[in-house]
Each structure stands twice: as structure tokens, then as C-alpha cells.
Amino acid sequence: MIDFNIPPYTGKELDYIREAIESGKICGDGMFTKKCSDWMEERYHAEKVLLTTSCTHALEMAAYLAGISPGDEVILPSYTFVSTADAFVLRGAKLVFIDVHPETMNMDERLLEAAITEKTKAIVPVHYAGVACEMDVIMEIAKKHHLSVIEDAAQGVEAFYKGKALGTIGDFGCYSFHETKNYSMGEGGALLMQDPKYVEQAEILREKGTNRSKFFRGEIDKYTWVDFGSSYLPSELNAAYLWAQLECAQQILDDRMATWNFYHENLRDLEEDGCIVRPYVPPYAKHNAHMYYLKTKDIEERTRLIQFLKENGIHCVFHYIPLHSSTAGRQFGRFFGEDRYTTRESERLMRLPMYYGMRESDRGYVTDMIHQFYRQKR
């Protein structure tokens, strides 16, 4: 069986976890947390990076820091994971879903201005598959209307927009290091900030409302409860696992890119024959090979193809069901304008196996079986 995903493992993870244990500090904000944060700050030119227990929690922190309050409206795509929406629902906000570009599955920035009302507080672009949204336009609209921009870059670590790292363009950026992502700590994430004014409040929020971070830096002689907060700080054991991945970031990226490029080249003929649609990467985007997907004719064909591949030992999956069509989506939000592409394109999309260390023979088997399906179909 060719698995859909295998969590990345580079070989040093256990050594670093052992080192964290032997250090006597495993609760977080120790040596490995600092290594990971410093690495991202330097590599992505971020003012501040805070590791979190998940991208979900990074989004929740961003919603707090952006001042999202009951009655505010937040504009986001419907084609995304529930965490994108939950973070703002928890703050009492109303969700305003807009349609996507069918080529990238990213929010259609041309629809933004018409969706803005006097209640709008933030725009939440989601960089689907590590392919950047059109951020210059989004930032220009946000500036014009005095709105916060919170980038859901869960899939966007080591991906760029016009040379800028995803997650560093808006007011806040949120990364995921879940086991399905390019770089993993099992469960984990990061909050990126470019404006220093948010840093102290973010540290307090992340540390249960205390100024503990200042204490550990030696800036105060004791720490105390100073504001509201929660526990968004991951264990040093998770950070140690992640550090082994970040040390090999380029190696992992190159390996995944080889799989992505293999799929893209070997499925070209099926697109030329009108059988499928391959991913599109705009000229302004440098993607990170987070996933490889294709689009079939319709949901019925997708179902048959996924079943055919499963019968031949290949695990493929479809992705999100649009949030606006869910029970909670109807309760907490509304779809602005016409759903021209979100539902239609989501029902055509399926993801192929993609992971660090995938063998070339397995890549070839996947593409051979997809070709066989379409030969039989004819």
C-alpha cells in the first residue's frame, strides 16, 4: 500500500528529544524552542516568531491580538480547514465567505471590497497548497479600509510571494507543524508578527496571562498574572523533534519538490487530453510542494478514481468540504455573492500521495495507475 502521508523523519529527532530530557527542562521555551524560533525569524525576516501548540492556537492568538470582538465580521474563503473559521467564531465574529480562484483555490481578491461592511475587522487569506494568494492587492485593500490581515499559512512554510515568506506579509501569520505538513512536530504551529507592538501581549497571552517570558529572559525578578491568557506553549520535546526537521529544511523541500515535479510532468499528457486539470502556480508564487492535487471531470469521476487507486494499493483523498455548506458554517457565517467555483471545484479535487522520502518507483506506480484508469474509461 502506498500511504497518502508518512510524517517526516530525518534521523536526529530522537537524539534531540533525549538531549531535551537530559537538560532537565521539557515544559517549553527552552533551548530547542529558541533554536526553532530564531531559525524562522532569521530565515523569513520575521520580527517575532512564537511556537504554539498548533496552527489552530496560532490563529486564536492572532484573533485575540487583532482585537476581534462579538459582532465583527471577518472575510475568508469557504474552502479551508475549520480552524481558520473557529478562531474567529470563538471571538464572537461573523464569518463572511467569498469565492475562490478556480486555478489556485485561493480567495478571489477581486471580490473583497464588495464584501466589506462597516463591521468588517479582518481579512484572512489562506495560502492553499503553499501557493500564495495575491497579497499586494489584499494588503492594499486592507490598508485602505483599516483592516487587519491574518495569513493562514498552515500549508505555507518555506513558500514565498514575490520573495517574501508567506506568513510575514500580513499583520500576523500562522504556521502548522502537524504530522501532515512538510515539517512536523507531531502537533504544533507558530505565530509570526511583524509589528513589535504585539510581541509583549502575545507572550503574555501564550503564557497563561503571565509575564513569565520576561522572567526567563532575566528582565524581571519574578513573574505574575498580568492579563488574560491561555496555554499555547508547546513542550520542548515537540520543539526538539521540529528542530531536527528545520535543520534539514532544504533537503526535505528538494525531496518533496522532486515528487511534485515528477507528478506534474508525468500527468501532463492527461491534462493535454482533457482528462484532468493539474495545479497552477502563478508567476508571483514560489510554492513548497506541500501537496499535489489534480481535478477530475466531476465528483462522480473523482469517486471512481479514488476507489480504483485504493483497489490498486494507493491511498488518495479528497480535501475540504466548503465551510459555508456545513451546519456550523450556516450558523456562524454567510456566503457573499455567488458560489461559482468553491463547491464545484472542491468536488473535483483529489490529492495524491506526497511525503518526504517517497520512492521514485512509487511515484511512477501512482501515475501509471492514473493513466490506466483513464485508458479503461475510454
Image: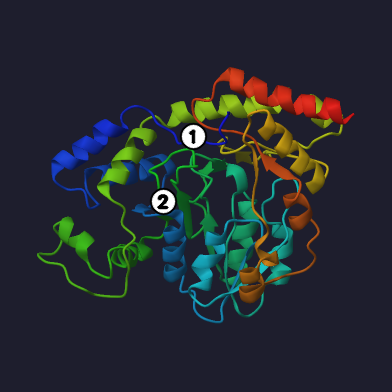
Residue with the most extreme left position: 221
**Image point (75%, 43%), residue name:** 303
Q: Amino acid at mark 2?
A: Gly
- Judge from the rendering whether residue 37 lies leftward or rightward of residue 269; answer left or right: left
For the rendered model, the colour scheme is: rainbow
Question: Where in the figure is residue 105, as x and y percent of width and height?
Answer: 69, 50
- Judge from the rendering whether residue 179 lies leftward or rightward of residue 232; answer left or right: right
Front position in the image: 151 or 350: 350
- Judge from the rendering whether residue 314 lies leftward or rightward of residue 180; answer left or right: right
Which of the two marks, 1 or 2, is nearer to us in this view? 1
Question: Where in the figure is residue 163, as x and y percent of width and height?
Answer: 54, 40
Quarter containing the C terminus: top right
Quadrant in the rendering for residue 41: top left
Q: Is residue 320 visible?
A: yes
Quadrant in the rendering for residue 3: top right
Q: Tag 2's secondary structure?
A: strand
Quarter containing the N terminus: top right
Residue with the most extreme right position: 378
**Image point (39%, 29%), residue name:** 248
Specify which label sits upstream in the sequence, 1 or 2: 1
Residue tagged 1: 6
Badge 1: few (under 14), some or many (20 or more) residues near its Cα, within 10 Å?
A: some
- Judge from the rendering whether residue 213 lies leftward or rightward of residue 293; answer left or right: left
Front position in the image: 169 or 245: 245
Q: Is residue 303 above or below residue 253?
A: below
Q: Amino acid at mark 1?
A: Ile
Res 189 label? 2
Q: Is residue 279 visible?
A: no
